[in-house]
Amino acid sequence: MSRKYSGYLIVLLVLGGVIYLYNHFRAAPDVTFASLPLSDLKGQPVQLPNNGKPVVVMFGASWCGPCRKELEVMSRIGERYMHDANILFITDEDLPTAEGLQGLTASFIHVLKLNQPFSELGIYSIPTSYLLNAKGELQDKHTGYIQWDDPSARAHQRKLMGLPDEAPDSL
């Protein structure tokens, strides 16, 4: 094989590796929410709420800066702009650490413990968020920080979840 074709082959292999790693570590995997092994902060088994409201599910950790920022923003704006959705923050950290996260959030954000590592779900990058409509159907999934305090981004997320438009005023 000539030197020219060897170089092309190496470039293709590297590019293929980069695409694989990106998809493996950056793309939000499909998750079966009904069978997630979750517990509340007392260690009692729980399931995702099924009360006819849309659900925002955020997978994150206490040590993750973007996760903490997203919790802070949701705590600040959620009661006004996301009151008609269930907001869940799921961590795979131990119960004492998860309890500490509840102290950082507003009362309407529920911190739950996933009783297995995120990697068993295929989640390798956090924050990873899922938006479910009132019927529990997946509407969107996103890896990375969501800018909930941006009115246009929030309007898009609300539309995906089937929520009515919010009042036209901004933060």
Image: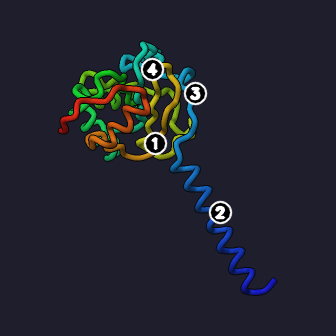
Mark 3 to mark 4 CA distance (whole Å)? 16 Å
Q: Quadrant of the C terminus?
A: top left
**Circle 1 residue:** 142
Q: Position of residue 39 (x, y in %)?
A: 44, 20
Q: Of the two numbered discs 2 and 3 on the same chain, state the one appearing first in sequence.
A: 2
Q: Residue drawn at (40%, 38%), measured in percent from left and top?
A: 60
Q: Secondary structure at mark 3?
A: loop
Label at residue 68: none
**Circle 2 residue:** 16
Q: Residue drawn at (73%, 80%), measured in percent from left and top?
A: 6
Q: Position of residue 99 (x, y in %)?
A: 31, 26
Task: Please name whichever residue, 85 or 68, is drawn nearer the observer in this view of the structure.
Answer: 85
The reply to whether residue 20 is visible in this rendering is: yes
Foreground tag (2 vs 4): 4
Label at residue 134: 4
Q: Position of residue 128 (x, y in %)?
A: 44, 40
Label at residue 32: 3
